[in-house]
Each structure stands twice: as structure tokens, then as C-alpha cells.
């Protein structure tokens, strides 16, 4: 609003010799404009600082994690000799042994016990399962040679992705010189390839980084969110409708309002304590299940939903209510058939934001035992499950370098969910926002 | 019914309400409103419920061990037999990261809020605001991972240079500002009425040289510092400050917006620049809302669990000296999160109950903070409405 002109205010009387108020103003003017500029700069700097922090955080996570979407595979020729596959029950054959003999036949010169063990370590222990799945789905003829792309061990994966340097001394890398030479031979034969990491999106947790995936956690998150949504949406909306439309102004209403704000201020870990003390120890509900997790998160999201829904209800102008009352509707009818439909988009926006908060929450779930190591993919609300943030936390604690990139990748997936949820909320708000 | 009778016997059914129908409507109204009231009070009762259940599990601890040890001792050995449950160092750690994050987040947040509300043009603002709000959308475990995997090694390996650069970037502009102001003041003090540019420039230059030497000396000292562990209070404070930032920015911006145009325009009309208007008129009027924002931001930092649990080092001792932010600390929330898995949950040992005592402490802090900030906001609203 103020143009920073360097000119002095008109009407200066410097020549006349007498000091007037205008001179004092003029004298200070330059300094004041300088101050103004500095002031603006500080504001900009603070915003830039937060933007820079956000950019640094996101880029470092992306840089750490993008390579997890690729996985190193090794092509292995598996000769299937007679008797290797069990005729009656092919699923019970010694696939581990078949894989090992296939590896040995590619490296015939390796004979020492210790060397053999180091050689097998280049291949993932999941290779046997891959072979088993291939054999079961498409039983091969005896005597043929299966050509199979099997998972490489995470150390080989890290080497191929450049996270492990080849030129450092042997003692400070996880693969020794011999193993490097074996890998170089594979590379020379074009038997090593990086492919899209489907395991990451389809498997549950595992101690082996190359076999670990987020699907179990995603499913756990979905179940948990369903419980949270099913409970918090109706409860939140009913509470908001009561407080905004029906509640008389009295002490009881004030008490309810104050407590909703208090609920919003409760530290998240305390919700976990409540879940532990009440749902697990008092009611004896099953540990580490989406059911309990969903109930605890419901308590956390309620204030968000209620506050947003009240704002949406407040935005519906009184003229709508009065018109409906004027044609003879009861108060309940006014709310149910006029106010609610108009306020619904705002309420949904609030609910989505609340759900996004719940989806990213970790601490209370640690308390109710959702931090267990769970390999199986959950199939229901009472199966033990992990959720995505907890899975991220568990992986972040693992020492392997391969888990660092998987952690970052899982964060990227979670962030993609959260950001798209928030974006939907913003778009909905823009789209349905009405000016009355 | 009476109205229908007044119509001179002409019965129009649409307006006739029989007694039974009326009763039905009343019952429906009663049931509907009662149902809604029940749900609304359920939400309110949850808070009491939380308080009750946490307190019920916390009281056995105080019965067994008394208050003195918990609040005054720093020896935290819950796994020993018999255990020692001195939480002073842990409470101190919580206070330390909370204060540290407030020191970073408050100036940053308030100046960002001012910038968003009064300085930036609308076209920039509509992009800047979502970016700051996005800081709130990032899950805490992602912050924790960032602190643990990226920031901690960075601090550990290049701690000295980072501290030096931070010092230059933060203290540099501040000190230069001080130099300019001091130069002005000195020049007018010495030169009296005939304040000359030459004199001012000389003073500013001399002071500037002194200031740069001072900056350089402190920077060099910081450069030589070796950070022993990257998982320390500084790391956590930094991350927590950015987590608290969106809260502080959005609440203070709301309260800056609540100061109407009239006050601003009045100030402009008197010839104040924008900076003067904001500092001398808008900020005082919005001060209570900003204080509430700061309290809410601090509460957020105090209640945060994952970042401190992952990246604070979790060693329960008071740093030496006590303001040493480069040392590992342990906080209340991290202790609850970390020890619950090991505490014997079934038999109700002191080790289990002490964690509830910590939860109770956190709960009390958050209620008090919330109460104060709410009072302040209500007062501001009343004052603004009254004027």
C-alpha cells in the first residue's frame, strides 16, 4: 500500500532555516523505508526457510528411496534331472537343494565348503520359493533346463545399485573379493538385471530386505482406516450437528465444547496408553489388530472431524433453515433434509483430513502392540497386522542398507496416499464451496 | 386443532394435526435430540475417560514409590531389581527439546504468519500457504526417519561446519541490523542535531568491522566443535520446530486476519509504513492470539513421540552443562513408547505404572496449555468485538 518512493514528502522547507515537523519526517524517511524493506525480507526468509526444509526433506527421501522400486535379479539355469521333483507331491521337493545344485553347476570350480556358503549367499533365500511357484504352476518335463530369473541377495542388490562401493578395502564391505569376482562373471554373461520390484508391492514384512514388501502393511492400514472411518464419521457428524443445531447455550454445552478442544490437545501417545489400559487389559480385546488400532485412532480423529463439520454447518446461512421452518418442517426435518446435504461436502473434507492424520499416526499404535513383526498379510479386522507408519518405523530400525532404501520408498508410498487425500480435500473444498 | 376449528368448519386435512400425530412428533423429536445429545456427550466424556483410566494406572506407582523419587531423582533404572524411577532427567529432556524447538519455531512461525497475512501478494500467498500446511501432512515417522538417517549422520560428520553456517546465516543478518541501528544511534548522540552521513558511515563501518570479527571468531569456535553423536537434542529440536511450524503459522495468521482493516487503514492514514503498522498496531492487537498459537505449537512439540524416540539418543541424563544441545537426551513420550514393550504389563509392576504416571503428567501439561490458550483466544475475541 505504501509505495517506497525515495522522494521526500512535498512541502519541504529546508531552505528557510526554521526546523519544521516536515523536516523531521523527511529526515527519518529514508531510514524508515530501509526498515520496511528489511522487514519484508525477514518475512520472506522465514517462508523460504520452511519451503527449503520441506524441499530438502522430500528430495532426500526420494533420493534415498527411488532405487527401491528396482530390484536386482539373476538369471539361473536350473537343470531338472530325473527324481529332483517329487512325482506325488511336487510341492514337497527339495527346491533349496535344486537351486544350490544349479548354482554349483554354473560355478563348477567352487568346491570348498566355506566358498560354497559364500556363493549361495549371493542368491536370495526366496529363490527356492520362486522355483517352487514356477514348478507348481507349470510342471516342467524331466531333463529340461528351466531358465529362471531369481532374486539376488540384498547385498548384491546394493552393489548393483552403487550403494556399496567396489573399490573400498575388502574388510569394510559386506561382499568379499571372491564374491565380487563371481558377480563380475555373472555380469559378463549378462545374467544380472535390474527389474521393477514387484515383491515390494505384493509381499508382507520379512527379515530379508529383498523379500520384504509393504502390501501387508497397506492392507493393515486399510482395515484400520475402515474401522476408524466407520466409527468416527457418524459419531463426529452427530456431535457436530447437535452442538451446532440443537444445543442450548448452557453450562453442559460449554463443558462438551471445552472437552472436544481438550481431546484435540491430548498427546497422541496418551491415546495409546488408553488403548492399552482399556481395550487390551480391561476388555481383553486381541493385541495388534486393526480393530483396536481403528478404535484408538477414531478417538484421535474425532476432534478434527467435529471442528470441520461445525464450520461447515455454520457456513449454511440461517435463511435456509428459516425457509424450511416456514413451510412447516420440524427441526429434525430441517436439519436432515436441508442443512445436512448442504454442509456435507465440508464435512467430508474434514473427514478426509482427519483420516489422513490417522493414516500417518504411529505412536499410539506402538502401545497396543501393532509393532510386532508380522509376516502374514492380514485377512480381517481381528488378524494381527502392521500399518504403514509402523512398518516404516520397524524398517528404519533395521541395520541393513537395503532397508534404508525400502524405508524411504515406503515413506514415498505413504506420502503419496496422504498428499492425494489432502489434495482431494482441497479440491472438494474449492469445488463445493458456495457463496451465499 | 384449534386453528382448524377457527376455519368455520371447513376442514383441510393438511393442516390438521391429531393428538396422536403430535405425540409421535414429540417423541421423535425427543428421541432424535436425545440421541444426538448422547453422542455429543460421549465425545466429551472420552476426555474424562482418558484422564480416569490413565490416573487409575498411575496412582499405584505413586502409592508404591511416593512422589519424591519421581520428581527429584535422575537415576532411571526401571529394569533393575528393585528398580529406580527417577524421572527428573526425562522431564528435563522433554523441557529441553520443547524449549529448543520453540526458540526456532516461534520467530520463524510468527514472521511467516505476518508475511502470509500482510506482506505477500495474493498470487504468491496462495502457493506459499499450502506448502507450509504440507509440513503438517507429513507423518511423524517420516520426520523421524529423516532425523535419524539423514540429519543425524550429517550432524555427526559435518557438525562443525553446519553449526558455523547456521551461525552465519542466523546471527549474521541480526548482527548487521544491530550495527546499522547502533551506528545511527551513536551518530545522533555524538553529532547532536547536525547528524551527518559521514559520521554515521564511519561509525557503522567501525562497528561493522568489530561485528564481523566477532561473527568470525564465534564461527571459528563453532567450526572446531566435534559433535559426538548426531542423535541429540539439537537434531530433535530442529525437526520438532518444523513440525510445530504449521500450527503456529495458521493460528497466528488467523488472529492477524481477525484484526480488521480499520486498524490497519487508520495506521496508514497517520503515515506509518507497512512495517510500522504491523509492528506497532497489528501485532499488539493480535498478540493474545499469537500467544495462543505459540502455546499450541509448543504442545505439539511436547506431545510428539516418534521423532524423539527415533532421533534423540534416549539416554536419560541431564546434559553437562545443562544447556548442551549437542548431547543425547530422553523425553517423556519416548520413554512411554520405548519402555512399554518391556514393562511387565500383566502383573502391574511399578515399571508398568510409572509409564502411566508419565502419561498423566503429559496429559496435565496439555490440559493446562490448552486451557490457557483458550482463555487467551476468548479474551481476544471479546476485546476485538468490544472495540
Image (spheres, coloured by chain):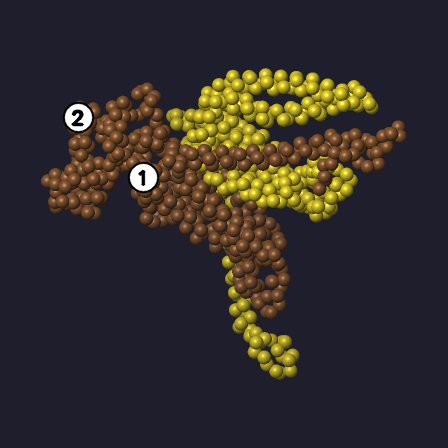
Crowd around label 1: few <14 · some 14–19 · many ≥20 (10 Å): few
Up the image or down, B264 lies above or below A187; here it is below
Q: Quadrant of the N terminus of chain A?
A: top right
Q: Residue B78 versus residue B113: which sits nearer the camera?
A: B113
Q: Residue B72 versus residue A106: which sits nearer the camera?
A: A106
**Image coords of residue A269 (percent x, y):** 46, 38
**Image coords of residue A75 (percent x, y):** 24, 36
Quadrant assignment, res A179: top left
Up the image or down, B382 lies above or below B198; here it is below
Mark with earlier residue (2, 1): 2
Up the image or down, A111 lies above or below B268; here it is above
Residue B159 in sight: yes
Q: Residue A312 versus residue A331: which sits nearer the camera?
A: A312
Q: Which mark is residue A109?
A: 2
Write the residue at 60% across / 55% down: A315
Residue A1 lies left or right of residue A313; in this view the side is right
Write the residue at 57% across / 19% down: B219
Report the chain holding disc 2: A
Judged from this view, the residue extending furthest toward the left is A82
Quadrant assignment, res A31: top right
Q: Colour of chain B?
A: yellow
Q: Which residue is mark 1?
A: A195
Disc 2 versus disc 1: distance between alpha carbons? 29 Å
Query: Are tags 2 and 1 found on a single chain?
Result: yes
Q: Which chain, by letter, is brown?
A: A
Write the residue at 29% across / 36% down: A193
Report the chain holding disc 1: A
Say which element carries label 2.
loop
Amino acid at each position: 500500500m505504501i509505495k517506497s518512493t525515495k522522494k521526500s514528502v512535498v512541502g519541504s522547507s529546508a531552505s528557510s532555516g526554521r526546523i519544521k515537523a516536515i523536516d523531521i519526517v523527511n529526515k527519518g524517511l529514508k531510514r524508515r523505508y530501509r526498515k520496511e524493506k528489511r522487514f519484508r525480507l525477514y518475512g520472506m526468509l522465514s517462508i523460504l526457510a520452511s519451503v527449503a526444509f520441506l524441499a530438502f526433506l522430500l528430495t532426500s527421501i526420494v533420493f534415498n528411496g527411488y532405487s527401491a522400486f528396482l530390484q536386482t535379479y539373476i538369471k539361473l539355469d536350473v537343470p531338472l534331472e530325473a527324481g529332483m521333483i517329487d512325482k506325488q507331491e511336487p510341492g514337497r521337493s527339495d527346491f533349496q537343494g535344486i537351486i544350490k545344485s544349479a548354482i554349483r553347476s554354473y560355478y563348477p570350480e567352487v568346491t570348498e565348503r566355506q566358498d560354497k556358503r559364500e556363493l549361495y549367499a549371493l542368491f536370495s533365500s526366496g529363490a527356492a520359493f520362486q522355483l517352487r511357484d514356477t514348478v507348481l504352476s507349470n510342471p516342467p518335463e524331466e531333463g529340461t533346463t528351466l531358465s529362471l530369473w531369481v532374486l539376488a541377495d540384498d547385498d548384491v542388490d546394493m552393489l548393483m545399485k552403487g550403494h556399496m562401493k567396489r573399490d573400498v578395502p575388502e574388510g569394510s564391505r559386506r561382499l568379499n573379493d571372491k564374491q565380487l569376482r563371481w558377480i563380475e562373471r555373472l555380469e559378463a554373461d549378462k545374467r544380472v538385471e535390474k527389474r521393477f520390484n514387484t515383491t515390494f508391492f505384493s509381499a508382507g514384512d520379512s527379515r530379508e530386505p529383498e523379500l520384504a514388501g509393504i502390501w501387508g502393511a497397506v492392507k493393515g492400514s486399510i482395515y484400520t482406516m475402515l474401522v476408524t472411518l466407520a466409527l468416527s464419521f457418524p459419531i463426529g457428524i452427530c456431535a457436530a450437528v447437535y452442538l451446532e443445531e440443537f444445543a442450548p447455550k448452557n453450562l453442559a454445552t460449554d463443558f462438551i465444547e471445552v472437552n472436544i478442544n481438550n481431546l484435540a490437545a491430548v498427546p497422541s501417545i496418551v491415546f495409546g496408553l488408553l488403548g492399552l489400559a482399556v481395550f487390551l487389559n480391561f476388555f481383553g480385546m486381541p493385541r495388534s489388530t486393526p480393530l483396536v488400532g481403528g478404535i484408538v485412532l477414531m478417538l484421535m480423529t474425532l476432534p478434527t472431524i467435529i471442528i470441520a463439520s461445525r464450520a461447515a454447518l455454520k457456513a449454511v446461512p440461517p435463511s435456509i433453515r428459516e425457509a424450511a421452518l416456514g413451510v412447516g418442517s420440524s427441526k429434525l426435518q430441517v436439519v436432515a433434509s436441508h442443512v445436512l446435504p448442504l454442509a456435507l461436502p465440508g464435512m467430508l473434507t474434514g473427514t478426509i483430513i482427519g483420516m489422513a492424520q490417522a493414516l500417518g499416526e504411529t505412536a499410539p499404535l506402538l502401545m497396543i502392540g501393532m509393532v510386532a513383526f508380522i509376516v502374514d498379510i492380514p485377512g480381517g479386522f481381528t488378524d494381527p497386522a502392521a500399518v504403514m507408519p509402523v512398518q516404516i518405523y520397524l524398517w528404519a530400525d533395521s541395520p541393513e542398507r537395503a532397508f534404508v532404501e525400502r524405508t524411504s520408498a515406503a515413506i514415498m508410498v505413504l506420502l503419496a496416499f496422504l498428499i492425494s487425500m489432502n489434495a482431494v480435500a482441497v479440491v472438494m473444498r474449492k469445488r463445493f464451496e458456495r457463496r451465499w | 386443532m384449534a386453528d382448524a376449528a377457527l376455519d368455520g368448519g371447513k376442514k383441510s386435512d393438511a393442516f390438521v394435526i391429531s393428538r396422536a400425530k403430535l405425540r409421535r412428533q414429540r417423541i421423535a423429536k425427543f428421541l432424535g435430540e436425545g440421541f444426538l445429545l448422547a453422542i455429543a456427550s460421549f465425545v466429551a466424556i472420552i476426555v474424562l475417560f482418558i484422564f480416569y483410566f490413565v490416573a487409575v494406572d498411575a496412582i499405584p506407582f505413586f502409592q508404591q514409590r511416593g512422589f519424591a523419587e519421581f520428581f527429584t531423582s535422575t537415576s532411571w533404572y526401571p529394569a533393575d531389581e528393585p528398580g529406580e524411577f527417577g524421572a527428573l532427567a526425562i522431564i528435563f529432556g522433554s523441557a529441553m527439546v520443547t524449549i529448543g524447538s520453540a526458540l526456532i519455531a516461534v520467530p520463524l512461525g510468527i514472521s511467516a504468519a505476518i508475511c502470509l497475512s500482510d506482506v505477500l501478494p495474493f498470487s504468491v500467498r496462495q502457493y506459499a500457504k499450502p506448502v507450509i500446511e504440507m509440513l503438517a501432512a507429513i507423518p511423524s515417522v517420516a520426520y523421524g526417519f529423516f532425523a535419524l538417517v539423514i540429519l543425524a549422520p550429517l550432524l555427526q560428520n559435518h557438525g562443525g561446519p553446519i553449526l558455523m553456517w547456521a551461525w552465519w546465516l542466523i546471527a549474521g543478518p541480526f548482527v548487521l541490523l544491530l550495527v546499522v541501528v547502533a551506528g545511527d544511534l551513536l551518530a545522533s548522540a555524538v553529532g547532536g542535531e547536525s547528524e551527518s552521513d559521514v559520521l554515521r558511515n564511519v561509525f557503522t563501518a567501525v562497528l561493522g568491522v568489530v561485528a564481523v570479527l566477532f561473527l568470525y571468531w564465534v564461527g571459528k569456535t563453532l567450526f572446531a566443535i566435534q559433535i559426538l553423536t548426531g542423535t541429540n537434542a539439537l537434531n530433535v529440536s530442529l525437526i520438532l520446530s518444523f513440525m510445530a511450524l504449521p500450527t503456529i503459522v495458521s493460528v497466528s495468521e488467523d488472529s492477524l486476519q481477525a484484526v480488521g482493516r480499520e486498524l490497519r487503514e487508520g495506521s496508514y492514514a497517520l503515515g506509518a509504513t507497512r512495517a510500522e503498522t504491523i509492528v506497532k498496531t497489528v501485532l499488539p492487537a493480535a498478540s493474545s492470539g499469537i500467544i495462543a498459537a505459540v502455546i499450541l505449537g509448543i504442545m505439539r512439540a511436547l506431545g510428539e513421540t516418534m521423532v524423539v524416540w527415533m532421533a534423540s539418543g534416549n539416554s536419560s541424563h541431564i546434559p553437562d552443562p545443562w544447556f548442551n544441545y549437542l548431547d543425547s537426551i530422553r523425553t517423556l513420550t519416548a520413554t512411554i513408547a520405548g519402555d512399554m514393550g518391556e514393562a511387565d504389563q500383566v502383573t502391574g509392576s511399578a515399571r508398568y505404572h510409572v509409564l502411566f504416571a508419565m502419561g498423566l503428567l503429559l496429559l496435565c501439561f496439555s490440559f493446562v496449555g490448552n486451557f490457557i490458550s483458550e482463555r487467551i483466544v476468548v479474551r481476544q475475541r471479546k476485546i476485538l468485538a468490544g472495540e
